[in-house]
Image (cartoon, coloured by chain):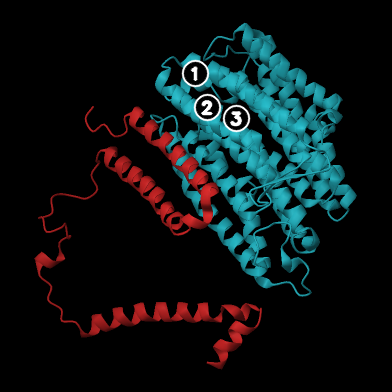
Amino acid sequence: MDLLLLATDQNTPFNYFPIALQLVVAIGFVIVMMVVTHLLGPKRRTSDKLINFESGIPSVGNARQPMAIKYFLVAILFVLFDVEVIFFYPYAINFAELGWEGFKAVLLFVAFFLCGFIYIVKKGALEWEE
Amino acid sequence: MKAIIAATIIGVVLMFTGILVKEKKGIATLAAILFFLLLGVNIWELSTLDANQPQAFFNNMLRIDRYSVWFNTLMTACTVLYVMLSGREIQKVGIHVSDYFALMSFMLVGLYMLSGYSNMLVLFLGIEIISIPQYILAGSDKKNLKSSEASLKYFLMGAFTTGILLMGITLLYGASGTFDIARFTFLQADSLNPMALCGIIFLIIAFAFKVSAAPMHMWTPDVYDGSPTPFTAFMSTVVKAAAFIAFIKLFHISFNSLSGHWTMIIAVITAATLLVGNVTAVFQQSVKRMMAYSSIAQAGFMLFAVLSISATSWQGLIIYAVSYTVATMGVFAVLMKLKDFTYDGFNGLAKREPLLAFVMTIFLLSLAGIPLTGGFMAKYFMLTAAVEQGQVLWLVIFALLMAAISVYYYFRVIIAMYFKQGSPEMSSPVTAGDRLVLVATAALVILLGVAPGLLLKFI
């Protein structure tokens, strides 16, 4: 405990002792859990258990097949707009303090995103059938 | 700041013209006009800026002074020249012509941020804004396997280096508690924090990658060779200059007092870059690939600006950036007219297109650093700065030796054009407009060699 107090006290690289401690604990936890489950758990290998898990559906063919780029496109667009929404959470919390200045900034942000949205719709990124 | 807003709006406008206008030529013309307007905005900003009073924006995260705005103006002018030189070739790359121009406009936003940042976050943002469009442009020739390879290679390596850059910024923040490049507190500390030193080394690695300095140059030949030629011309010039101004800004303003710790590292990087760039360029068979190695070699010379902390090196950086950019764009403009990019493809060009061969000779002489061209003055300023600093005289001698080697591979093209027999195949006819722009570019190269002071007038 004294060590931890010392660590928070001085402005040295020793400051980072708690972080190193956390790192050791995190890695140690993972190693211990893996080793323990490996040693304690019963082992029953059946052919059903060794096949790839595909959401309860019997697996078909190889995973390394060419597939339409549209899946990737939709996924990446989803991530993009999802991140946009994430930016609203901190804004919602600080809504009152930021006032009109913050509102204008957010409006600008949304306007740019809207530009992007119109662009992808017009470019036909969301048209499934060609 | 005005320029940043204008470039962003121009980028968005260009994005949407692709939907409204289907004709490629119309888009290219519009892009040229808009870039010209952007140049006007830069000049307007330059004229309204007080010489002794830097302007600060966003809580002092962006500090724009005379030097940075003048640098922006020159680089925008180079972009206008580039659009005029290779606008027709850009139209041939693919179907999304408007997007290519829009991405270039966004890259200029990144350049404006890199020349004016005073906060590590803006530095990071600027580097990302300038890098991501490059990944896309490198892969814009979608049917070409080499282009895809270039894009993927550049993206993976670039993303990895971004991680190193971020780690460096994090360590510096941990050591000083601030992102402001003018207020790193470890500079005043008696004992240097090892964390800060680590951060500086990480930043050197990240910047060396962005300016393609050895030993972080591995991506350069493949990416520059694989990318569509007009985009190689842009990536190896304007973007590289932007990375350099960010480099010199950080190391001269922030780490000035620590120069004892990093001068030798940069000196070794410079020597390695000069050696690798020049010696490997000698063995290339393709002129395009030779230009990729030549851009590494030229980066080695530009590193002299980072190495020696003085006003001369800041002036030298502007002169070097502009004269290298103009000459390289010229070389690529001529290269794009030819079908065969090997040295043999140039055989007998002087017979078939005497003017093209002549301007190509001027550009190559400038890159080799022959007097009366811009390249000579540029190298002169760089080496003067190093001599003034006095610590790395061995490097100056080494650089001169390497410049002599560079003459060999630049002159190989000239020899092929003038003294060898052959009938080069052209990819497109050379119009009167092409000739006019090429002659103007060549005249600019000579002008920079005769009166380099023109570039320093507005700082």
Q: Is the same chain shared between marks 1 and 2? A: yes
Tell me residue B29's x, y (percent).
55, 16
Q: Which mark is residue B101?
A: 2
Q: Which residue is mark 1?
A: B27
Chain painted cyan: B
- Chain letter, disc 2 residue: B
- Chain letter, disc 1 residue: B
Q: Residue at x 69, y 30 (%)?
A: B42
| Residue type highlighted by circle 3 | Ala
Q: Residue at x 66, y 29 (%)?
A: B76
For this view, does A79 lie left or right of residue B82?
left
The reply to whether dot 3 and dot 1 touch (C-beta < 8 Å) is no
Camera-near label (3 vs 2) is 2
| Residue type highlighted by circle 2 | Phe
Regarding residue B213, the answer to whether it shows in the image is: yes
The reply to whether dot 1 and dot 2 touch (C-beta < 8 Å) is yes
Q: Secondary structure at mark 2?
A: helix
Q: Residue at x 59, y 40 (%)?
A: B110
Which of the 4 quarters of the picture holds residue B279? top right
Q: Is the same chain shared between marks 3 and 1? A: yes
Q: Which mark is residue B233?
A: 3
Q: CA distance from mark 3 to mark 2?
A: 14 Å
Mark 3 or mark 1, earlier in chain: 1
Regarding residue B331, the answer to whether it shows in the image is: no
Chain painted red: A
